[in-house]
Image (cartoon, helix red, strand yellow):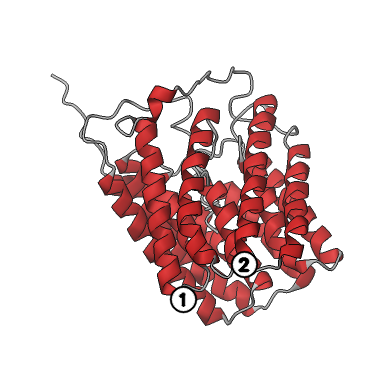
Amino acid sequence: MTQATPPRSWWAAVFDLGPHAGAHWTALRASLAIFVPLVACWASGRGELLLYAAIGAFAALYGRHEPARVRLAMQAQASAVLVVGVVIGALVATSPFRLWLLVPIGAAWAGIAVLLAERGRWHPAGALNPVFALTASATVPIPLSTVPAAVLAAAGAAGFALLLALPGRGARDGGEPVPHRLAWRDLRPSDPVGRHVVRYVLGIGAAGLAVATSGIGHPYWTFVTASVPMSAPDLHARLTRAAQRVIGTAAGLGVAALVLAAHPAGYVAIIVIAALQACTELTTGRNYSLGLVFFTPMALVLGDLMLPASIGTLLAQRALETVVGLTIALAATLVTHERRTPTPPNPSRDHLPDHPVFSSADPRDS
């Protein structure tokens, strides 16, 4: 009699290495999508708009496994959500009470974004990138007069990403997209999608309280880190993602120390950011920890261009905010964990790796 194979532990999955799956096309698109808008901002003397341009460029991360037509539609939806996130976040950033405003606004936005992601079957899944768009925009103080330019920078970068959406092939080229419709009955707190929404609202709301009461240096890192495990489909995957986040961030901080020690600035810094973005996309789908090795220094170089700080301060803040964000995410996961036997995942989407960040998941933690 054949014995059943014992289930693998979540810890063993931390070190899994996925297939390449045409990641070079995604890496090329993602690198160009962020490089060109950043160069345009810097060349026009508007370095304060780099963050918003980078947010719009994240639209290129969506639909990497899809045929060109499906990828374009998915990126168009994600682009609209990212730009709306910048609009709301930039308006919040004009208020002296922005961190307290982020508690209800960030939580509500996370719930809305995860509903849109589920309905559109986005990949990367979850609300990580929309949460980053709003919280990063909201935590960098700007005058009201800068809001239109910030929105234009994000929209322009997202539009450029859409132009890059057609070239290249996805892992599913030749196949039909899986039809999906989200019904209102799926939104009950007792159902998986409803529970997912509750998890995001609780997690992002708690992250907002932690940020508002602690005065953490780069608040949006806490929000993004809290979003990462919650993007995974079940408890096993969330624990795996959290462990990968810790391992990848720790290694990435070492790489970041070396990169920042060279003090890249201006166009050199933008080239470094684009190269690290390409490396992130080449590795994230294979293993989330590997993607974070490159994403972490990319995010820190971009952050240093926006809000310069000492290398030690940047690294220490990143480490602290990773711990705080993951603690909140795991608490929200345990509170909302389903007690019944989960439904087997849909192989049409759930077997596909996430992006880190930004990585519907994927690092897109920034």
Task: Return the mark for residue 140.
Answer: 2
Q: Amino acid at mark 1?
A: Ala
Quarter occupied by the N terminus? top left
Q: Residues within 10 Å of mark 1 (few under 14, many from 20)?
A: few
Which residue is pictured at 47% across the width and 72% down the height? 216
Task: Return the mark for residue 209.
Answer: none
* Between 1 and 204, the one nearer to me in the picture: 204
Q: Position of residue 131 (x, y in %)?
A: 53, 51
Q: Position of residue 3 (x, y in %)?
A: 16, 25
Residue at the spot of label 1: 316
Q: Amino acid at mark 2?
A: Val
Q: Is residue 165 left or right of residue 221?
A: right
Front tag of 2 and 1 = 2
Looking at the rendered structure, the secondary structure element under dot 1 is: helix
Point out the tag, 2 or 1, that comes first from the N-terminus.
2
Note whether 153 is above or below 176 in the view shown: below
Q: Could you give the CA–CA distance between mark 2 and mark 1, rounded to whole angstroms?
A: 19 Å
Residue 234 picture quarter? top left
Which residue is pictured at 74% across the width and 38% down the height? 162
* Between 251 and 311, the one nearer to me in the picture: 311
Residue 183 seen: yes
